[in-house]
Amino acid sequence: MTVPSIAHLLKGGRLAFLYAMTWIPLGMYCTERSHQKPKWTIALAVFWSIMALTHVPKLQPRYIK
Protein backbone atom coordinates (compact mmCIF):
# COMPACT_ATOMS: atom_id res chain seq x y z
CA MET A 1 0.00 0.00 0.00
CA THR A 2 2.89 2.40 0.61
CA VAL A 3 4.81 1.64 -2.58
CA PRO A 4 3.01 4.26 -4.74
CA SER A 5 3.70 7.05 -2.25
CA ILE A 6 7.35 6.07 -1.87
CA ALA A 7 7.76 5.81 -5.64
CA HIS A 8 6.23 9.27 -6.02
CA LEU A 9 8.68 10.67 -3.48
CA LEU A 10 11.64 9.09 -5.27
CA LYS A 11 10.53 10.40 -8.64
CA GLY A 12 9.71 13.87 -7.33
CA GLY A 13 12.99 14.27 -5.42
CA ARG A 14 11.33 14.68 -2.06
CA LEU A 15 13.21 11.87 -0.37
CA ALA A 16 15.78 14.37 0.93
CA PHE A 17 12.96 16.25 2.63
CA LEU A 18 11.80 13.12 4.45
CA TYR A 19 15.37 12.30 5.44
CA ALA A 20 15.85 15.80 6.82
CA MET A 21 12.60 15.64 8.78
CA THR A 22 13.90 12.68 10.76
CA TRP A 23 16.93 14.65 11.92
CA ILE A 24 15.06 17.72 13.24
CA PRO A 25 14.73 16.39 16.85
CA LEU A 26 18.49 15.82 16.93
CA GLY A 27 19.06 19.39 15.80
CA MET A 28 16.78 20.73 18.49
CA TYR A 29 18.58 18.62 21.09
CA CYS A 30 22.00 19.85 19.93
CA THR A 31 20.78 23.45 20.00
CA GLU A 32 19.49 23.10 23.54
CA ARG A 33 22.68 21.43 24.73
CA SER A 34 24.90 24.03 23.01
CA HIS A 35 23.28 26.74 25.14
CA GLN A 36 24.33 24.82 28.25
CA LYS A 37 27.75 23.55 27.17
CA PRO A 38 29.86 25.22 24.45
CA LYS A 39 31.31 21.85 23.32
CA TRP A 40 27.96 20.96 21.77
CA THR A 41 28.37 23.69 19.16
CA ILE A 42 30.65 21.28 17.28
CA ALA A 43 27.85 18.71 17.15
CA LEU A 44 25.47 21.45 16.04
CA ALA A 45 27.83 22.43 13.21
CA VAL A 46 28.06 18.79 12.10
CA PHE A 47 24.26 18.56 12.20
CA TRP A 48 23.83 21.58 9.93
CA SER A 49 26.48 20.22 7.59
CA ILE A 50 24.53 16.98 7.23
CA MET A 51 21.31 18.93 6.70
CA ALA A 52 22.95 21.02 3.98
CA LEU A 53 24.20 17.90 2.20
CA THR A 54 20.75 16.34 2.12
CA HIS A 55 19.43 19.22 0.03
CA VAL A 56 21.90 19.17 -2.82
CA PRO A 57 20.30 20.49 -6.01
CA LYS A 58 19.04 17.86 -8.41
CA LEU A 59 21.24 17.21 -11.41
CA GLN A 60 18.41 16.17 -13.68
CA PRO A 61 17.90 18.45 -16.69
CA ARG A 62 14.63 20.28 -16.93
CA TYR A 63 12.99 20.46 -20.27
CA ILE A 64 12.06 23.90 -21.47
CA LYS A 65 8.81 24.09 -23.35
Image: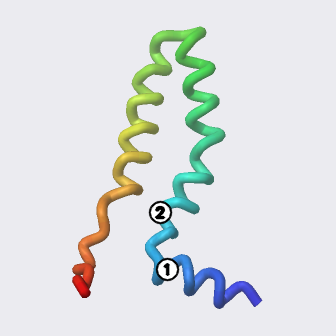
x 60%, y 38%: residue: 26
x 62%, y 31%: residue: 28
| Most foreground residue, 4 or 28 | 4
- Provide residue 14's location: percent of width, then percent of height: 50, 69
| Most foreground residue, 13 or 46 | 13
- Provide residue 20's location: percent of width, then percent of height: 53, 53
* Figure check: 58 above or below 62: above
> Which part of the image, by quadrant, shows the C terminus?
bottom left
x 44%, y 20%: residue: 41
Which SS class for mark 2?
helix
- Provide residue 55's location: percent of width, then percent of height: 38, 56
- Give the label on residue 46, or none: none
- Provide residue 49's location: percent of width, then percent of height: 36, 41
Left or right: 27 in relation to 3: left
Label 1 Cα crowd, 10 Å radius (few <14 / some 14-19 / many 20+):
few
- Give the label on residue 10, or none: 1
> Can you identify the residue that label 2 sits on?
16
Count of numbered circles in the view? 2
* Figure check: 43 above or below 40: below
